Image (spheres, grey):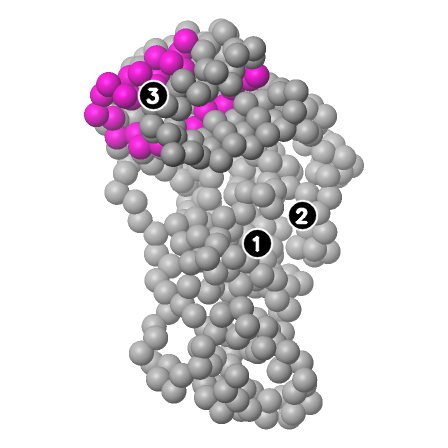
Amino acid sequence: MKLDTPFKLFANCVIVKGHNRSTICDLQRNDVRTIPNDLYDILTDQEGKTINEIKKEYNNEFDEIIDEYFQFLFDNEFIFFTKQIAIFPPLSLKWSDPAIINNSIIDIDKNSSYDVLKVLKQLDDLHCRHLEIRNFNVARIDILENILAFLKENESSIQSVELLLPFFKGVEKWITSITHNFLRLDFIRVFNCPSHQNIAPSTNSKAHIMYTKQHYESELCCGKISQTFFAANMKAFTESINHNSCLNKKLSIDKNGNIKNCPSMQNGFGSVHDTKLKDVVNDKKFTNVWSITKDQISVCKDCEFRHICTDCRAYKENPTDEFSKPLKCGYSPYTNDWEDWSTNPLKKEAITYYKLQADTEKP
């Protein structure tokens, strides 16, 4: 390390302060490290100074700790040393997307009767690029095949497709067939399986396939907050700063054909049977939730992981407060502990309100 040369945080390494600790989010390498809030203060207040100058700021009382901090930063390539600080501007954290709707969820079950292909055509008009299809009943495999065939035969704006479906006899053979024929498939999750298995993309398919014992019987499975869902990349991070990390530019169709921000949300904006999607996206009531950021949400705004985390406005600890913490989050930024949200007695009332069966949320 260079003790007498000013230090600079790499632009792709963005720091986020939490209640008890902070994080360094490396948006280039999708890496996240927790750091003490004292180090956060040094990085924000002392950037552009030398290590020796910083030690003097603290009257040389914490030289050993400061050395440890900067050795950690240097070893992990979070900082570099330069005398030309001014020529390294900060990273722009603006977010933009030209699509009116950039992602959509379509739910179907054995009783779904709406015209899915009609919905797909309207999503094309909105320039939707990412589609998640959640099939809660094996009897609707025919609809999945019709959707994939439509996307293959038409110049659809949809670039990637995710599938959620239950396990059935012969599912492996069926998946092999569709992944070879429909190259837009990006991720397939099969639930209620006898065992867990992950299959990485191959030379013949870009789809990641996950077989899980977990249950996903309905839209009630939505909204779980987990470290496994953290995403420390430029797109996700900047979107979280400026918009809602789950609902921004999202449009969903529930199993009954109702148009919603998310299939799990209670408020609907008409039915696809008699309402056009383009009319819904021009409704300010529909787009209002797009701008609810983690910096506005109770508890989340104090969390060091808030800008790499997902969000949920469908299930909240206080159902009547639009800025309430997600119900299915078991993390506390005040203790830095993860707990099982479904057994928390403080959440019992909300769980009852949403008629959730917490046991079905577990593997």
Numbered disc in front, either 1 or 3: 3
Q: Is residue 170 left or right of residue 270?
A: right
Q: For the residue carrying disc 3, how many other residues have a C-alpha within 10 Å: few (<14), some (14-19), or many (20+)?
A: some
Q: Residue furthest left?
A: 155
Which residue is farthest front?
A: 203
Please tell me whether residue 22 is drawn above or below residue 138 in the rendered image.
below
Where's residue 346, x and y in %?
Answer: 75, 39
Tag count in the figure? 3
Tag shown at residue 181: 3
Residue 204 lies, in percent from the top left, at 37, 30
Q: CA distance from mark 2 to mark 3?
A: 41 Å
Q: Is residue 325 left or right of residue 98?
A: right
Q: Is residue 279 visible?
A: no
Which residue occupies the foreground of this view, 328 or 283?
328
Q: Quadrant of residue 149?
A: top left
Residue at (54% x, 23% y) in the render = 190
- Check disc 1: other Cα within 10 Å, few if <14, some if 14-19, many if 20+: many
The amino acid type, in three-letter code, at marker 1 is Phe
Q: Residue at x 46, y 10 (%)?
A: 140
Residues in magenta, as a range: 142-167
Amino acid at circle 2: Tyr
Describe the element under mark 2 as helix, strand or loop: strand
Q: Please name the residue that numbered disc 1 is placed on.
A: 305
Q: Position of residue 185 (x, y in %)?
A: 38, 28
Q: Is residue 238 above or below residue 70?
A: above
* Occupied quadrant, residue 187: top left
Residue drawn at x 68%, y 29% is: 363
